[in-house]
Structures are given as structure tokens and as C-alpha cells.
């Protein structure tokens, strides 16, 4: 994983702040970008995203989704023929 991508820390539930951000315009100093972090929670999942904007242009977005429960898989048999 690139050192220029924000990373999500599960323990603190926060995003890291790299000095340079990998953007649609190449590497860009984070200090020159607007940073917006959002969180959303539903019954089954918790979502977080960090966006970097240059003026009105979205130049980077990283997202993290955490399922509150594991997926339930059921096995079965099917007859062929």
C-alpha cells in the first residue's frame, strides 16, 4: 500500500494524515487540500470515508466499511439430472 494514501486505524477509528496525498492530479501536499471525514452507521455496518478536495474538485477518496456481524452462509444440496 502506498505511503501517500490515508490509512484507517481500527483501534482509534480515525484516518491517518499523510503529508502528500495520491490524487487524480498526482502527488499533492495535504496542506493544500480540503479534508473532509464522514461516518455513517446502519444496523449491519459502519462506514467511514475521507475525501480530499481542491476547490470544488474531488481529487481523492478512501473508504472503509466494517460489518457488525459476519456473513451468514448456508450450505445445501442440489440434485442434478
Image: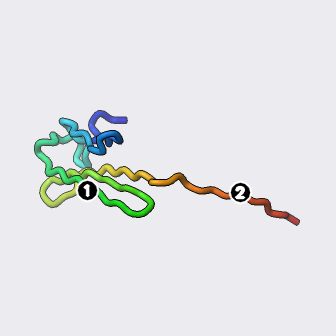
Mark 1 surroundings: few (<14), some (14-19) or many (≥20) residues within 10 A: few
Q: Toward the viewer: 54 or 61?
A: 61
> Which one is earlier in the sequence, the residue at label 1 or at label 2?
1
SS class, disc 2: loop
Which residue is the extreme one toward the right?
81
For mark 1, give the secondary structure: strand
Q: In which quarter of the view is residue 19 placed?
A: top left
Q: Establish if 19 lies above or below 25.
A: above
Quadrant of residue 53 within the rendered picture: bottom left
Residue at screen point 29% across, 41% down = 12
Q: Which mark is residue 38?
A: 1
Q: Nearer the viewer, residue 35 or 40?
A: 40
Residue 47 is situated, as x and y percent measured from the top left of the image, at: 35, 55
- Tell me the residue that label 2 is attached to: 75
Disc 2 crowd rating (10 Å Cα; few below 14, some 14-19, many 20+) is few
Residue at 26% x, 51% y is 50
Amino acid at each position: 500500500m502506498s505511503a501517500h494514501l490515508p490509512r484507517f486505524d481500527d483501534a482509534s477509528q480515525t484516518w491517518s494524515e499523510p503529508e502528500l496525498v495520491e490524487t487524480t492530479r498526482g502527488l499533492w501536499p495535504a496542506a493544500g487540500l480540503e479534508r473532509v471525514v464522514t461516518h455513517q452507521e446502519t444496523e449491519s455496518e459502519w462506514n467511514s470515508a475521507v475525501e480530499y478536495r481542491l476547490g470544488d474538485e474531488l481529487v481523492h477518496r478512501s473508504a472503509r466499511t466494517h460489518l457488525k456481524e459476519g456473513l451468514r452462509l448456508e450450505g445445501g444440496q442440489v440434485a442434478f439430472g
